[in-house]
Each structure stands twice: as C-alpha cells, then as structure tokens.
Image: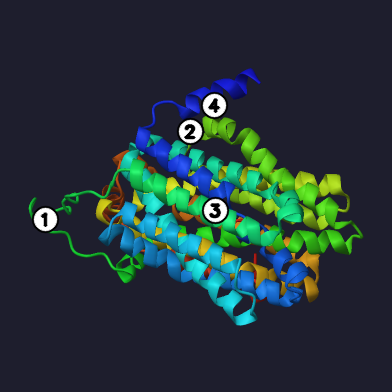
Amino acid sequence: MATLRRAAKESVSGLPDGFWWLWTSTLVNRTGAFVLTFLSLYLTQELGYSAWYAGLVIALHGLGGVAGSPLGGMLTDRWGRRPTMIAGHLGTATGAAALAVVTSAVAVAVVVLLMGVTMQSVRPAIGATIADLVPEHERRRAYALNYWALNLGFAIAALGGGAAIVFGYRTLFLVEAAATVLCAVIVFLRLPETRPAVPEAAKGADAGAPLPKVSLVEVLRDGPFRTLVLLNLFVCLIFTAPWVGLPLTMAGEGLEPSAYGMVIAVNGVVIVGFQLLVNKITERRSPAALLTVSSLLFAAGTGATALAGTPLVFAATVVVWTLGEMVHVPTNAAATARLAPEHARGRYQGVMGMSWALSGFLAPILAGWIVDGPGPDVLWMACGVIGVIAAIGYATLLRRVLAEAEGAGGSEGAGDAAVAEGASADPVATVAVAVAPVPAPETGGRKVSG
C-alpha cells in the first residue's frame, strides 16, 4: 500500500491544470457511459429484438467510429481542439437522448451509427490536446492517467446496472445525455484551446514559410507511423476478442453468465487498482520494448484462454492480458504523439483511432464466426499467434524509429534519421510478409480505448 500511495503521488504531480480539466471531463463522460454498457440488454430484454440484431447495432457503432475518427482528426487540426470536443460531446448527448425515445429497428440503428461517429470524433482532439499541453517526457504518464480516468468512470457506470432495474434503461440513457452535456460545458468553460497558433517550421523550409497541408493520404504515407497503426490494429483485434469470445467460451464450458460477469470485472479492478503503479514501473522504459512486452502479454493471456475451464483460471488469463492493456494503451498514444508533426497531431491521432474503431467493428463479427465454426480454441490460438507477430513487428520494425524519436524529442527528426541510416524497406510490406502464413479466419481478434 505504501508503494501504491507513493506511485499515486508521483503519478499525479507536475502536470498542467489544463490536463486535469481534460481528465475531469473524461471521468464525467465515462461515469455516465450507459448506452454502450447496456445497449444489448435494452434491445433484447426491453424492446424484444434478437441477439443477432443487437450484435449488428453494436457493430454499426464501431463502423461509425471508423468514419468519425479521421473526421475528428481533420476537424481537430483545422477547426481546433475545443470546438471539436464540444461538437462531438453535444452530438453524442443528442444521440443518447434520442435512444430514450426511438424504438424502430431502423431508427435505433441509425442513431447508434451516428453516435459512433460523434463519440470517436472526440478522441483525436483529446489525444492532440494532451500532446499540446504536456511536455514530451511526461506524455506517456499523462495518457496513462487519462486512460485510468476512462476505466474508473467505466467501472462506476457498470454499477448502474442495478439502477436500470429501478429506473429503467431509458432513464440511464438520459443520464448519459446529461453527463455528456456537462462534459462539453467543462471543456467550454475550463479547457483552453491548445492548437498551435504558428506551426513549427518544416525542416529545411524558410522560417516564415507555411507548412503544406497534411491530408489523410499524406499521413498514411508516413511509413513508420503506418507500421505503428497496423501493429496496433493487430493488438486491438486480440484485445477486443475476449469481450465477444470469452462469454461464449465460458458458456460452452457450462458456466453461468454471472461467472463471466465476475471474471470480466477483473479487467476494470486491475486497471483502477494498479494503473498508477504500472506507470511508475514503466515510465523510463523504451517504447518499443514496452509495446513488444504488451503484445506478448496479450498473446499469453488470450492464448491461455484455450486451456482454461474454471472461473479462477479464466480470471487469471484476464489479469495477464489486462497487464498488456495497461502498458500498451498509454505507450501507443505517446508514440503516436511523438511521430506526429505538431501541425498534424489531430490527423495522426485520428488515423490511430481508426484502428481501434475498425477492430471494434471487425472483431465481434470474426470472433463470433470462429467460435461458431472452427471453435473457441482456434480463436484463442489465433489471438496468441497474432500477438506474437505484433511483438516481433514492434521489436524489429519500430525499435530504432521510436528510440530516435524519443531521443530527438520530435517526429520529424526521427523520420529524417531513419532515412539517413538507409531505412529503405517499407515496414508495411515486411509486416505483410510476416503475416502471410496466418490463415485469414485467424486474423480476427469491446471497450473503446483509443
């Protein structure tokens, strides 16, 4: 406990006031996050729709995020961080309020799809704001603290299940709308606009020369960053798989749904209880090494699920991949900020967020198909293989680039150093060769973490 208290004190010291207002808005927002938490139960138990339809609607939310993330990234750089966050929060609040009213299948699907767009559009602005506010050497800690707030709020929201019995799901959706509006008010009143007024000069350009606009295509042409996004997609797929495959696997072992509830709750308990300590342990470590280790933890935790048969063993596997989650999320966010030029932070965060959203769309479909077809053991073994491939990719393709970026204190210096040292091979092509032997059904991997 003394170590935890010391780690907590050191983790929260020295960050600017603006970050803490952003942290507070994240906590408020996630504390009221009832729609995604209880949407499947609302659709099946109260409105009487099939489980297939509920799964489709949740997948549509992920599909909306695929469009919302790059859109939010573009607005973050062009329009500003605060306007993008405020507009996204108000749009999400409108969607949550609408779900308390609409009941038709088409209307519910459209509202949830649009909520996916608005919810995900906020995340690039949050990521860019943290990069703007927090010095380079403190960013990983700041991203970890923001992720801790997200999970703390999610844990509080999950406890609202008992309130749903008393007040009904529609009341909870209205509460989410109110909490999201409050989040927008906090951003409007307390959070400063952090978009750089004068972007940093391009390397080799005149000091007063305007920087070229960075489109989505230009972001995807950044080889090291493209590799980071692809490897993150692999990790996201195996991170999302347990949220779909684990309850199905446990049911196949004859365990009650309540057992799954207790097992998956371990994820939130471990993050809320130990994220600050993990931050302290990992704060001076190499980004590539941390991403490699986190991928191996994901591989070990999800792969070992194939050997589990009791709630205790299933819970142990959750602890392992949760440790991977706690290391991966802030490290990946800080690496994204490090590789992004100052004037394109929103777009880079938006493309990275798209990998999270895409996994939220693909993983539920692929995991369900694999469990119903080849079987759950194939799903978990595939997750283990993909995790190992991601670890190899981080260790071999990004170790030098991330080390140089961290040493140079900026993305452009790292990119130039990589070119100067003859990094001529396309990292994505290298990853593609490594992935080629894996059968397509095994490339499939819920909590939105980006």
Total marks placed: 4
Please say if the residues under marks 1 and 2 sit with CB atoms less than 8 Å apart: no
Q: Which residue is mark 2?
A: 283
Label 1 Cα crowd, 10 Å radius (few <14 / some 14-19 / many 20+): few
User: Visible in this render: residue 336?
Assistant: no
Q: CA distance from mark 3 to mark 1?
A: 37 Å
The first of marks 4 and 1 along the sequence is 4
Residue drawn at 55 percent across, 20 percent down: 6
Task: Please identify, in this view, whether the residue under mark 3 or under mark 1 is nearer the observer.
Answer: 3
- The amino acid sitting under disc 3 is Ser
Q: Position of residue 292 (x, y in %)?
A: 55, 48
Q: Which residue is located at x 64 percent, y 42 percent?
A: 323
Sequence-wise first label, 1 or 2: 1
Categorize mark 3 by other alpha carbons within 10 Å: few (<14), some (14-19), many (20+). some
Residue positioned 65% across, 51% down in the render: 298
Q: Nearer the viewer, residue 332 or 399?
A: 332
Give the labeled residue for mark 3. 449
Q: Nearer the viewer, mark 4 or mark 1?
A: 4
Q: Position of residue 248 (x, y in %)?
A: 80, 64
User: Quadrant of the image for the N terminus?
Assistant: top right
Q: Is residue 381 left or right of residue 431?
A: right
Amino acid tagged 4: Ala
The answer to whether residue 2 is seen in the rendering is yes
Q: Label 1 near label 3: C-beta < 8 Å?
A: no
Q: Amino acid at mark 2?
A: Glu
Residue identified by numbered label 4: 8
Q: Position of residue 264 (x, y in %)?
A: 74, 50
Crowd tier of the residue under label 2, counting other residues whose Cα lies within 10 Å: few below 14, some 14–19, many 20 or above? some
Report the amino acid beneath label 1: Ala
